[in-house]
Structures are given as C-alpha cells and as structure tokens.
Amino acid sequence: MQASRRKFIKGLSAASALVATQGLARPLGFNYIPNLMKVSPNDKIRIATIGMGIQGNYDTRAALRNPDVELVAVADLYQGRLDTAKTAFNNPNLFTTRDFREILTRPDVDAVLVVTPDHWHDHITIAALKAGKNVYCEKPMVHHINEGKAVIDAWKKSRKTMQVGSQRISSAAFQEAKRMVQAGDIGTINYIESNNDRFNAIGAWNYSIPPDASTQTLDWDRFLGDAPKRAFDPKRFFRWRNYKDYGTGVAGDLFVHLITGVHFVTNSLGPNRIFSSGNLAYWKDGRDVPDVMTSIMDYPKTAQHEAFQMVLRVNFANAGKIQNVTRIIGNEGQIEFSEDNLILTKKKLPQAPGYGNYDSFFTFTPEVQQEFVRQYDAQYPAESRMAEPVKEVRFESPKDDDAHAKHFGDFFKNVREGSQGTIEDPVFGFRAAAPVLACNESYFDNKVVHWDPVTMTKTTGATPVRKSTAPVKKTVATAKNNAKKS
Ligand SMILES: NC(=O)c1ccc[n+]([C@@H]2O[C@H](COP(=O)([O-])OP(=O)(O)OC[C@H]3O[C@@H](n4cnc5c(N)ncnc54)[C@H](O)[C@@H]3O)[C@@H](O)[C@H]2O)c1
C-alpha cells in the first residue's frame, strides 16, 4: 500500500468513526467529512454498489472493466441479491449488508454506485457525499424536481467527484454527433424527435419476481423510505418503475437518456416549456403511470443554439411495426442514430425556388407564363438552380467502443485527480432530470410546465403578452407620472 493511501485510510477511519456514531443513530443525518485527499494514481479505487439489482450488476461490471478498481462491498434490500453478488463477483468474502449506512462508514470505500429505485437516489447520494464518498448515481438524478438543488449543494460542499449515469453520452456515436453539430454539419437545429416503443411484458417493466420474496427475505420498510407506508407487495418492490411513489415513469426512465444526449450534443441547458399527453392504454396491471406518452419541449434560443422543438414518445402498447428512431434535424441536414452508429445526411436547398409541376404556374395564361419565365430566368442564373448533391456520411462506432466502461472511466479519472469535472456532473444531471420530471408533472396535472433552465427553477411562464395586457392603463399612467416627475 502506498504511503499516501495508508494516510488516507487512517484519516478516513477517524472520520468514519464519527459517521458511525452520528449516522447510524440519526439516519441520513451525516455531517460533512472533510476528506479531500486524492486517491493516488497507483492505488486501486475501491467501490461499493448500493442497489445490486439489474442495473447494479451491469454498472458494477462496467466499473470493473476499468483498471485498478475493486469491488469491496454491496448493499441491497433483498437477501437473494446479496448472496448472488458473492458468486457473481467471485468473492465469497464480499462484505454485504441490507443497510447502506454500513457502507458509508467503511474507511476502505472510495466511491459508491447508487443504483436503487429513483426515490432513494437523493437520500443515499447526499448521505454518501457527506460521508466523504465519491458518488456515481444512476439516472434520473432525483425523483422530484424539488430534490435537485439539495444534491447539487451537497456535492459542492463535499468537493467530492460525482457522475450521473446516462452512460450513452460517453459513446463514440454521441461524441461524433457533438463534433458534427458543433461543426455546423446540419446547419441550425430546429427539431429533435425520438420514439422508444415496445410491446412485451419485460420491456413494459414486468420483471420476474422471485418466489421466495417475503418480509423475511427483503427489507420492505426500508424500501418504502420516504414513500407512503403500505402493506408488503412484491410487485411494488420488484416492479417499482410501475408506481410513481418509487419511479419516474417512461419520462424519467427513458426520455432522460435522450435529453442528456441532446444537452451534451447541443450544449443546451434545457427547455423552458414542457407539455405531455398520454394514457394507460394496455398494461392495466395496477400500475399508476402511463404506458403511452408524448412530450413536447420547447428549447429557447441561447448563445449556443437557435430555438428548437423536441418531441419524445414512448408506446409500450405498440403492436404495430416498431421503428424506433432518434433524429436531430437541422436546416441543412439531419443526424439519425441507429443502435451505436449514426448517419449524417446533408441537404441544402438551391437558391432558386423552381416552378411547374404541382404549382400555380399552369393556372396562368400563356402570356403570363411567358413573362413569368422571362423574369425567373433573369433572376435565377443556372448555378442558383442546382441543389448541392445530398451527402450521406455513416459513422460506425469502433467494435470495442464501451460507453458504459468509459462513463465510469471518466468518473474514476476525476476521482483520482480530486476533480469535480465529470462529463455528467450533478448540475448537468439535474438539468436533464428536471425536464423529464416536468413531463410527468404536465401529464398528471394536465398543464404546461414552465422551467428556467439557467436558474433551474420552475417559473409561472407568464408570457410578455399576458404581462402587458391587464396592466396596460397602469403602465401608461405610470409612464405619464414618470414623465411629470422628470
Ligand atoms: N443507465 C441506464 O442505462 C440504466 C438502465 C437501467 C436502470 N437504470 C437505473 O438504475 C436504477 C436501478 O434500476 P434497476 O433496474 O437495477 O432496478 P432493480 O429493481 O433491478 O434494482 C434495484 C435494487 O435496489 C435495491 N434497493 C432499493 N432500495 C434500497 C436501499 N435503500 N438500499 C439499498 N438497496 C436498495 C433493491 O433491493 C433492488 O435490488 C434506477 O434508478 C434506474 O433508473 C439505469
């Protein structure tokens, strides 16, 4: 062990003892641990996964595909998953617990992966940051809009590294899309569309429930956390996405990936107007979130981009032909994502508008047609009538492109450097999460949600028209008064 590492662990032990006495007695009430020590580049980064369900397993494996990373502990609420982790990660002595706070008091844990249902993200993340841990938190960063600022504050105060887990932005395809958009390859973006349809039970989140699920084999009360108390229901525990008490619906689960990608590619801070419509059309299995949803988001003009509209759709009841697609459309072309690859199509209109075919030209008298052609020929020389040939550029990601491992790689690099500059820090993570949470708010409350992406706060959305109509007279009177005064 490096000297710096020994010092680091020694320092942490004292700090952890503090957490052990305070944290366990007062759940989630950690004080900040003033541990700003960097991990030595020669040392291993020791991780612990909190929430070892489906994605917890995928995340942990992706993290371990990076060099010098070691899994030392796992927290989960279902005993079967704790037992499986020991075999899955080939370590019969792996420390496992149902109480995540026992992970936070361990001095040998440098970073935690928060891979629980959405309603636990903010609580565990804040507690971990306060305990001096670096945090990789799954998307969406928070369950409700009003939880975002507290996570950002905790991250800033802790000075620890945090990465939010929409790993696709670390793919070669998204990096290339960003390069293309910033190079102006598709001109000015005016529209972005994406749909993510499915038609199968697992795709609609009805994951398998283990037959031994009971209040003995899992910690139901802890699962509920800040959600309303209710009797044990294995469906809610293992299919939590179907209930808004724990999950964030199709918007939080799926739209968030696309918004994250769009913000990354365009350098946008977010939309200012969000509207959703939808329905529970097919999966009437007790869930309280829609299975068909379309959301429209208006992105205002900024120094980075012109105004554009984004339309996102999920249909979990699409028994027709499923053609999922994501397109970024500009006034000189489009980028279409397909799996891990993308196709750039460049298309520019000629300067001359053309005439004839389905046009009013044939309705003119012969004399007027003649005069029209004379004027047209004078106005549009031959070169202005030629459209540039449509160009198609296919970008194929390298076969070994591993976005998930790279997303963790960026996190670990920053952990080693003691830096907070990850590709998807909590400010970025919240700017992606808030609009999708607003999609849900719009759907459930049947309203347009107005959002200020700069200050990251909801607004009343009062438009200049509304502001100026009622108080017109007052404004005039005030102006007159002012004029008198001056
Ligand atoms: N980035 C991606 O592509 C991606 C993909 C899938 C899921 N996710 C995200 O990962 C998270 C987990 O999703 P999942 O599909 O793995 O769910 P899951 O139900 O398979 O696993 C969640 C696990 O968390 C455990 N858990 C719940 N509360 C806990 C607590 N307080 N302490 C410790 N463990 C707790 C449960 O026991 C369960 O095993 C969600 O936030 C989801 O949105 C991200």
Image (cartoon, rainbow, N blue to C red):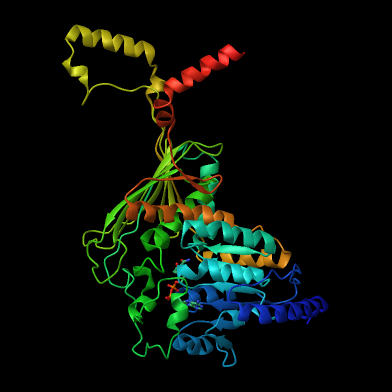
* Residue 362 x, y percent position in the rendering: 18, 18
Q: Which residue lies furthest to the right in this view?
A: 3
The quarter of the image holding the N terminus is: bottom right
Q: Say which quarter of the image contains residue 44.
A: bottom right
Considering every residue shown, the one lying at the far bottom of the view is 92
Residue 73 lies, with reference to residue 191, above or below; the image says: below
Image point 34% across, 71% down: which residue? 205
Residue at 21% across, 62% down: 319
Q: Is residue 410 visible?
A: no
Query: Residue 127: where, in percent of width, then height?
Result: 60, 71
User: Residue at image x 33%, y 78%?
Assistant: 235
Q: Name the quadrant containing residue 232.
A: bottom left
Figure disc tally: 0
| Residue 351, horizontal then vertical, whole percent | 40, 23
Q: Nearer the viewer, residue 198 or 217?
A: 217
Residue in front for this viewpoint, 47 or 483: 483
Residues 242 and 347: in front is: 242
Position of the C terminus by quadrant: top right
160 vs 124, left or right, is right
Image coordinates of residue 440 in percent, x first then y, are 37, 56
Left/right placement of residue 248 relative to residue 400 reads left
Question: In the image, what residue occupies the spot 21% across and 26% down?
Answer: 358
Say if 451 sits above or below 213 in the image: above
Residue 243 appears in view: yes
